[in-house]
Amino acid sequence: MKRKLLIECAVLLTIGALGIAGGMGAYLRSDARTQSSLLQPGVYVVVIAAVLVATALAYGLLGLRRAGAASLPPPTTSTSAEDGPAVRLVYTAIVLYGVLIPVLGYVPATLLFLAAEFWLLGVRSWPRNLALTLATTVAFYVLFVHYGEMIFPRGVFVD
Amino acid sequence: MDLINGLANVLTAANLLYCFAGALLGTLVGVLPGLGPASTIAILLPITMYLDKTGSIIMLAGIYYGAQYGGSTTSILVNMPGEVSSLPTCFDGYPMTKDGRAGQALWIAAVGSFIASIGGVVAVSLIGPGLARYSLKFGPPEYCALVIFSLTLVVSLSGAGLSLLRGLAACLLGMLLACVGIDPLTGVPRLHFGFTGLMQGLDIIPVTVGLFGIGEILSSAAARTGRIYEGKLGRMMPRGDELRKGLKASARGTLVGLPLGLLPGFVPAVSSFLAYDLEKHISKHPERFGRGAIEGVAAPEAANNATAQTGFIPLFAFGIPTSASTAVILAALMVYGLQPGPVLFDANKAFIWTVIGSMFVGNVMLLVLNLPLVGLWARISQVPYKYLAPIVLGVCIVGAYSPRNSMFDVGVAILFGFVGFLMKKVSWPVAPLILGFLLAPMLETSLSQSLNMGGPGVFFSRPIAATLLVLTVVAVVVAARLLVRVPPQMLDGDDGK
């Protein structure tokens, strides 16, 4: 529980610090002579980020004080511990899909993605998997490319 | 007169189709555990950009209020709430099923939802335009105070202690993310860290698609299906004393839900629990609750529908969303270039009254969909996730890509999908993040304009702004007192659900 709390705090503090740095950068880059607003560029960002840092510190301190006690609400997750690898694989397939669309083109990448996702999520019969993959890809093509007239990347081999 | 014109506009084939699609999809996501109205609206929002704007909003609104109907079906039949807002319905709905009174529980849930929804739409029709006209008195200080009021209430409803700090941090995170890109007041680029993609800012659609769509699917990917209800529904309509008790509880639930819908953070899940709690308190036989009391089904179902419906009042009148779902609907209004407030009721009269009119028609459709077809919905709720999830994920990617034809936005959606999944896994609320993201630009602009009008003192020299700031403090105290009665898991009930 302590480890989880420290990770949460570290993430918030990092984002807060990035916010302060980004806000300060915007403030320093701006030309004061062109600014008429009392809310100078970057000030709003710095204030939000500073409050986030303060909140992260308060969260960490309060959490550490309560660590080990029953006051920490138990995580309410939809996935159990053993589902972790499955979720990781499902997410990896989504990331790969995002990478493959510009490389292979929308339709081939979608075929691979859907086949992988159906398999990962439990459609282990290959004929059924292929039928679902083909039907869904054709439906997506007709709906989004044909009727929706969306222009997707066609892949490096075509372009 | 405007409402009659609006109702007449709804009765065209195209609008009726959009309305039916919204009611159908809403009921579907209501019965499917894991997929909620906010995620469905977020997933469909980019696709609706290719449709007629009035029809799209009719459909998206229908999904939101339709989901409140559908959530009760699985609560009653298989003790598995389709939506968090239907969790209290399980307490007495499932015992009624075990008692052979499933039909009566479903009947009172649908009729109670209908009564409450119609009450809610009447409130939208009566209060909405007046409140929108009143908002003409709002200048930058008033809008700034209103945003502070809304954000404070949303954060304070995250819970107490660590939960409260989580809500605050999530809200600040959303506000910070909204700052990425170009400063709207000075044109200075900020928080881009050298990435040109970030200079155009984060678009609301990939962020919501990621947080609610992909995040939700990842969280539910491993969900197992429950067993299909094979028993008989029994007589549908309750009779005599049971009918009277059910209808009275529906009326009370409606009265609890109506005002709560106006307040940011009071998601339908909270009002349904408060209505259940009230029924138990005023009952002469509180020991009947949890054993199949019809009031325990009628009141929470009426309350969550009333809250969902009146949530449209602050959305249409001020552009203030009260929940994650209405936040995504606000994003849709923004995408279509529709400015909530008096302009919506004056310049876009036909649009707004058609949408309000569609809510009357949509609720009638929902009543028909939810009573005779209840058995079908119970079976559909068992569709395994292994078939649904890949299709929904594919639609999410298209949805993130389509608004700007940008693979950068796809990357943003995938990243926020992981963020949404992690937030759910470690019990961080997503609703404050999305509300902070949506309201931060309004806060920044109105704050800057207010300060230019007369410094910080301007907030206390204008009665409406000062009143809103005082109300912020009062609301925090009242919310803290009400929270004692609500279990913590109900407070995050609209995060995609």
Image: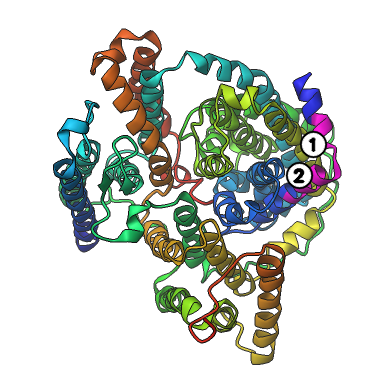
Q: Which mark is residue B361?
A: 1
Q: Say whether mark 1 and mark 2 are on the same chain.
A: yes
Q: Could you tell me which residue is drawn at 55 percent across and 54 percent down?
A: B39
**In this view, which residue lies farthest toward the bottom?**
A126
Q: Nearer the viewer, residue A153 or B251?
A: A153
Judging from the image, the colouring scheme is rainbow
For residue B353, the mark is: none
- Give the CA distance from mark 2 to mark 1: 8 Å
Left or right position of B248 against B145: right
Circle number at residue B19: 2
Between B147 and B485, the one lying in front of the other is: B147
Asked whether B20 falls inside the magenta stretch, the response is: yes
Establish if B161 lies above or below B45: above
The N terminus of chain B sits in image quarter: top right
Residue nearest the viewer, comparing A153 with A131: A153
As shown in the figure, which amino acid type bears the numbered disc 2?
Cys
Disc 2 vs disc 1: Cβ atoms closer than 8 Å? yes
Mark closest to the chain's N terminus, 2 or 1: 2
Image coordinates for residue B99, horizontal then vertical, percent: 74, 50
Q: Which residue lies most toward the front here?
A: A33
Residue appearing at x 44%, y 54% in the figure: B207
The magenta segment: B7-21
